[in-house]
Structures are given as structure tokens and as C-alpha cells.
Amino acid sequence: MELKQAAEALRQRGYEVCVFDTKEAAADHLDAAVDGRTVGFGGSMTLEAMHLWERLSAHNTVYSHLHGFPLGPEAAGAEIYISSVNGLAETGEIVNIDGIGNRAAGMLYGHKKVYLVVGRNKLAPTYDEALRRARNIAGPKNAQRKQMKTPCAVNGDRCYDCRSPERICRGLVVLWGPMMGMETEIILVDEDLGF
């Protein structure tokens, strides 16, 4: 799977796109681009691997529920929103599954700019494969990380489309292009990052 092919498809869909060889280079880019702003983070192991909260919080107000800020209006109302995705098709469709809705909502509305950071492990050849990846790879790994008592967390192999009260995959967002009135930049990294 090719980052260059995905980058070109994303550009054709109207996204700003930057491609980096390493997570450190991508973090340097974001650290330089976001300064003196309010920033909301989606719960993302990709951002954690980049140590992005530590870097950006030195010169921005960064709201992240993984770093002591409860889910609430602060991250939702931030000027900048940064998250990752569960799957990216080489044809440019971006797939995200969410349980609470904060990440999905953050990608869709209310910010001056959204940055989506995507490691090469999130790439899939087609939309169907990106959706399959989101449901059967990212979903179970996130449920295990959160120690949920769902079939996908217990077995760690696939989505069971369960009805568990602890189910974390409750909503699906597919982006076919950047939302109107909000800049969206996709940052592709040639490393495996997150789930």
C-alpha cells in the first residue's frame, strides 16, 4: 500500500496533505504549525506515540481526556482539533468508528482547522477494506486497551456486532472530503502508529 497513492487521492478530494518519514518529523510539523491556540485531542494512541500532548501543551492550551481533562465542551470548542483515524483507503475515504462521539464530532464540525494523523498501518486498498480494518482491527484493540467486556476484546480477533453495554463501536463516520467551512489537513506518516 502506498502513502503516495493515498496522498494523491486525498489531494484530489480537496484535503491538504503532508507526508513524513517519521513520527518525530510529523510532530515537529504540528509543533511549528499550532502555536498559542486552544487544541482538542481525540483519544488517540497515534498522538500518544508521537508525544504530541507534551509538545503542544508547552505553548498551547490542549484539552485531552487522556491527560486529565474530562470529555466536555472545551475540546469540542477548541480552535484546532487533532486526532487519528481507524482506516484510510488508498482511494481517499477516511473511516472512523466512535463510541462516545467526541472524535467523530470533532472531525465534522466546529473547529478552525482539523489535523488527522495517519500511520501507514491504517492504509487499506479500498473503502471496504478500510471499513473492515476499522471494525476488525482497530475496534478490538481499542476495546482491549479500555479493558471492556465485549466479545471482540475477549477474543481479540474481530468485531462481533455485539449488543454489549460496553460496546465502543457505536457510530461510523466516513469522510469523502473536507467539511465545508473547516480546513482539514491529513498527515501521513511512514511508520506504524496506533491501532
Image: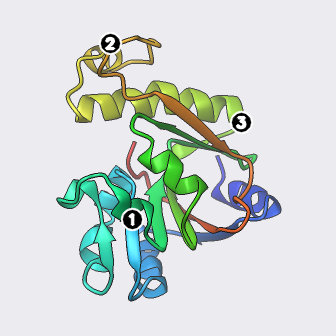
Q: Observer-nearest residue: 65 or 146?
A: 65
Q: Observer-nearest residue: 14 or 132?
A: 14
First reached walking from the N terminus: tag 2 or tag 3: 3
Q: Which residue is mark 3?
A: 126
Amino acid type of the residue that numbered disc 3 sits on in the rendered structure: Thr
Query: Is residue 121 shown left or right of residue 131?
Result: left
Q: CA distance from mark 1 to mark 2?
A: 31 Å
First reached walking from the N terminus: tag 3 or tag 1: 1
Q: Quadrant of the C terminus?
A: top left
Query: Is residue 175 shown left or right of residue 22?
Result: right
Q: Which residue is mark 2?
A: 151
Secondary structure beneath dot 1 equals strand
Rendered position, 175 above or below 136: below
Q: CA distance from mark 2 to mark 3?
A: 26 Å
Secondary structure beneath dot 2 equals helix
Q: Is residue 189 visible?
A: no
Question: Residue 43, percent across and down?
Answer: 34, 51
Dot 3: few (<14), some (14–19), or many (≥20) neighbours within 10 Å?
A: some
Rendered position, 37 above or below 134: below
Q: Which mark is residue 40?
A: 1
Secondary structure beneath dot 3 equals loop
